[in-house]
Amino acid sequence: MRLLKILAFPIALLYGMAIYLRNALYDWSLLRSTEFSTQTISIGNLSVGGTGKTPMIEWLLSQIPDTYKLAVVTRGYGRRSSIPILANPEHTSEEIGDEPKQLISKFPDLCLRVDGDRRRAIQWLETQVKPDIILLDDAHQHRRITPSVAVLLTTYDSLYTEDYFLPTGNLRDSRREARRAACIIITKCPVNMTPEQQQEVFIKIKPEKGQKVFFASLEYDKNLSGARSSSILELKEKPFTLVTGIAQPKPLVNFLRSEGLQFKHIAYPDHHHFSDKEVETFNKMDVLLLTAKDYARLGQLVTNASYIEVNHKFLGNGESEFLDLLGIKKQNASI
């Protein structure tokens, strides 16, 4: 593996040069970036997947009061269609993508626009829907739009400052582009993270002056959902199979093991399209556990699956400070 990364290093250099030039063209205003009158909040990262963007969108949707009219824009990565779609719960993951399907299943009344051209999507929303806030999924590297607030996610055990350009590493954008974020959220932190550990991360990422840094851990729901709703406790009664098609399954695997569960883990690449043969195999299993994103693809195809929800849990006063940064006023004093 190390040899492959060394051999790929020249490609990574060329890729990095192309990214640098593209960003420079926007910085020099030779390429146009549009800022909209509607408040737009971009949730993004610098790496390829695995930082928790979709759970962060879900967290915001659950935290922002109903007094705000919300909309979400996403490109719907991995979908089989390319036309703009105003999503509804009847759409399949093949039509809109697994992450949009996950969102619309959990928030059926959500105004969710799936469009590879985010600028076009925002223009449509401003004309047809007139939302108060638009959440932009995975849009930090999308320089055609200048968001009102840019939120950058990076994981505790794989900080962007310690990563490299594709294909040697996982960076799809330059580290220096972190400067455009109003705040950086360190996700997947240890639940019992100490102030000293937080300071170590703070020193590593060297935030810009005035740039806020928040820390959040993952919190798994022990009550399972899906075709066979149950709980983590019931899974202790017999071995089961965990199927994941996400970028970073390690935190989930570690959590399940910490609960004393015995299981077989079958890992697929992020956004994997499951074949008919794979689905047939899954249906023969007694107990099947999925992530929420994988259930968005498999929920209509398998009859024996439960899925586990995951949420971000901010450390300290991070929740209220983050919402204050976004200009979100809660109806109640408590979060």
Image: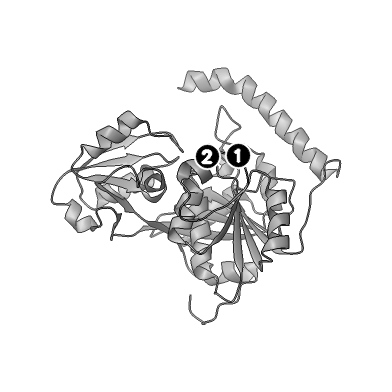
Up-down: is 164 above or below 129? Answer: above
- Quarter assignment of residue 124: bottom right
Q: In the rendering, which numbered label is found on residue 79?
A: 2
Does 290 appear above or below 164? below
Q: Residue shown at 60%/61% (left/top)? A: 71
- In front here: 26 or 73? 73
Q: Nearer the viewer, residue 30 or 170?
A: 30
Q: Residues within 10 Å of mark 2 (few under 14, many from 20)?
A: some
Q: Could you tell me residue 303's position as x and y percent?
A: 26, 46
Looking at the image, residue 163 sits to the left or right of residue 108; the answer is right
Label annotation for residue 63: none
Q: Residue furthest toward the front?
A: 90
Binning the other alpha carbons within 10 Å of mark 1 as few (below 14), some (14 to 19) or many (20 upward) gives some
Q: Is residue 239 left or right of residue 243?
A: left
Question: Dot 1 corresponds to which residue?
Answer: 82
Secondary structure state at the residue bearing disc 1: loop
Quadrant location, the N terminus: top left
Image point (53%, 58%), residue name: 57
Q: Residue at x 37, y 31 (%)?
A: 275
Q: CA distance from mark 2 to mark 1?
A: 7 Å
